[in-house]
Amino acid sequence: MFYCSHCQKYYPEDTHLWRCNCGTPFSYLYSEQLSFPKEKIKVRDNTIWRYWEALTGVNKENITSLGEGMTPLIPALLEGRKILFKLEFISPTGSFKDRGTSFFISKLKGRNITRVIEDSSGNAGASLAAYCAYSGIKCEIYVPEYTSAGKLLQIEMYGAKIKKISGSREDTSIAAIQAAREHYYASHNWNPYFLQGIKTIAFEIWEQLLWQVPDNIIVPAGQGSLVLGCHLGFNELKTAGEIKKVPRIFAVQAANCAPLYQAFYHGLSDPVKIEKKETMAEGISSAFPIRGREVLSVIRESNGEIIAVEEKEIVNSLPKVIKLGFYIEPTSAVATAGLAQLFSKNIIKETESTVVILTGSGLKATDKIGKLTQAQTGNKDDSLFDNTSLKI
């Protein structure tokens, strides 16, 4: 069942609406009592579906999985301190979005949806295109013109139709919504199914830490699905009696596009209207976070913070992480740049356990990483990163 937290109205899941009539995004309600039978979990396949008892409302015959989940949790030294990296960038399509998409498409199969429309800055579109291809659902993805060439090619190769939209990320959403009047709007930002898959990252961290939780979670944030997914997952574990506390959640935004940070800094309950500037962290370039009020509430409830990092901080952090062996895209480096800030301000103590989620693969942003490298080295030869031959 879908629920509007503003109107307190309930909607059936087969509604044609993608949000409440008042404009508020839906929440997903379920009556089942969640459980986490450890002995069963430990012997199941290494996908998000090992937590079957906590993934409600899906018939097993409709499960759509490409092997997403159980990404490694690897110790590393960053800024002279030991942390844990959660390697979401090695997911089937190269980003954490596969978790949400697996649950999302599994639900849509149960509803006999045969065609969907989505808007994305890249990773979510690639994920949806892949899972739609696997399940036989037709897919059309609306993307901003500035989307990385690697992400565009990936989407196209899965067989999805691409619609490039000039202007902002928000212009792309408007165009997709208009097109979705005739077909199902499979928005990972609006639809509450998506968060049900994302929450499994909390279950995995708990399991990988031998049924314990860390003190801190650091994530990049645009729309904030990772923030909400982590909060949802850890709170479900707490409600089930598996853990006694939830980690502090720290969300990091690019200063050039930081409506959540501005609201948090000024003590507001809703994201503020900003004038967005270009950022290399294209995956979190969202000026109007749809669930922004929820994100701000969740961060405060966890006793965490929202911080912002400048482009220079992202540029400095990206090669540091890559040289540790983790080939990430610039959006992921927002989280590591934020971690350095939190260390320097002593907000995170050296004795605390901290997990940083690396969200997307650098293989999708080779053009941007290449240009960054050229700028740092002064190398004028850009032949390796020339995308003019990619007719997307």
Image: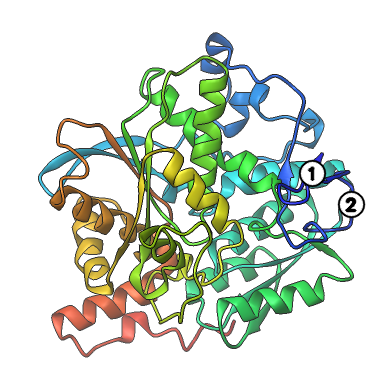
According to the image, label 2 marks what residue?
15
At horizontal 36% and vertical 44% (from top left) the residue drawn is 304
Q: Name above or below for residue 73 compared with residue 290.
A: above
Contact (Cβ within 8 Å) of mark 1 with mark 2: yes
Q: CA distance from mark 1 to mark 2?
A: 9 Å
Image quadrant in which you'd find residue 32: top right
In depth, the one of 126 and 184 nearer the eye is 184
State left or right for residue 333 relative to residue 344. Answer: right
Q: Which mark is residue 183?
A: none
The residue indicated by pointer 1 is 2
Residue 356 in percent (x, y) is at: 33, 44
Quick one: which residue is furthest to the top in this view? 39
The residue under label 2 is which amino acid type?
Answer: Thr
Front residue of 44/288: it is 288
| CA neighbours of label 1 inside 10 A, class few (<14), some (14 to 19), many (20+) | many
In the figure, residue 255 lies in which quadrant? Answer: bottom left
Most foreground residue, 141 or 184 = 184
